[in-house]
Amino acid sequence: MEGNLLKLTSSSIYRAVGKGMRLDEILETLTKTSDKAVPPAVVQQITLWVSECRRVSAETRVLITCPAEETALKVMASSGNKAVQLSETVIALPDRKYLKKVEKLLKIKGIFLNS
């Protein structure tokens, strides 16, 4: 009786981690499905691939692009603690609702948003 041949690649390990599997679960599954002991070099490589995995968050933001750093500083001063300065001339606001509040404050300072 022949056993199954499993092809382990970084992509297959990344998919497993992406579906929520932990290192111990991956190794346990491999051990259960293998007729032979899993070689230490294979365990080491899988451990490395799992350690390379990261989870990130995606968020939607409203960006204000200013013509100069001086303008960006004025925008930041009007935007409160929810604004984040991404570069010398780019400001991120949490959403359009917050943008409307900031827009009113900017008009008082002579700063107008392009349509």
Image (cartoon, rainbow, N blue to C red):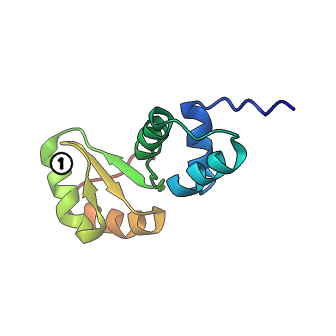
- Of residues 106 and 77, the one nearer the viewer is 77
For image coordinates 54% across by 32% down, the residue present is 10
Decide if residue 90 is on the left or right side of residue 49: left
Query: Looking at the image, how many numbered discs can be counted on the residues?
Result: 1
Residue at numbered disc 1:
71
Decide if residue 109 is on the left or right side of residue 12: left
Q: Quadrant of residue 13?
A: top right
Q: Amino acid at mark 1?
A: Thr
Question: Image quadrant for the N terminus?
Answer: top right
Mark 1 neighbour density, 10 Å: few (under 14) some (14–19) many (20 or more): some
**Vertical side of 3 occupied by 63: above or below:** below
Decide if residue 57 is on the left or right side of residue 31: left
Outermost residue, right side: 1
For image coordinates 46% across by 55% down, the residue present is 57
Q: Judging from the image, what secondary structure is the residue with disc 1 in?
A: helix
- Of residues 98 and 12, the one nearer the viewer is 12
For image coordinates 64% across by 38% down, the residue present is 36
**Vertical side of 107 occupied by 49: above or below:** above
Residue 99 image point, x, y percent: 40, 63
Residue 61 image point, x, y percent: 43, 55
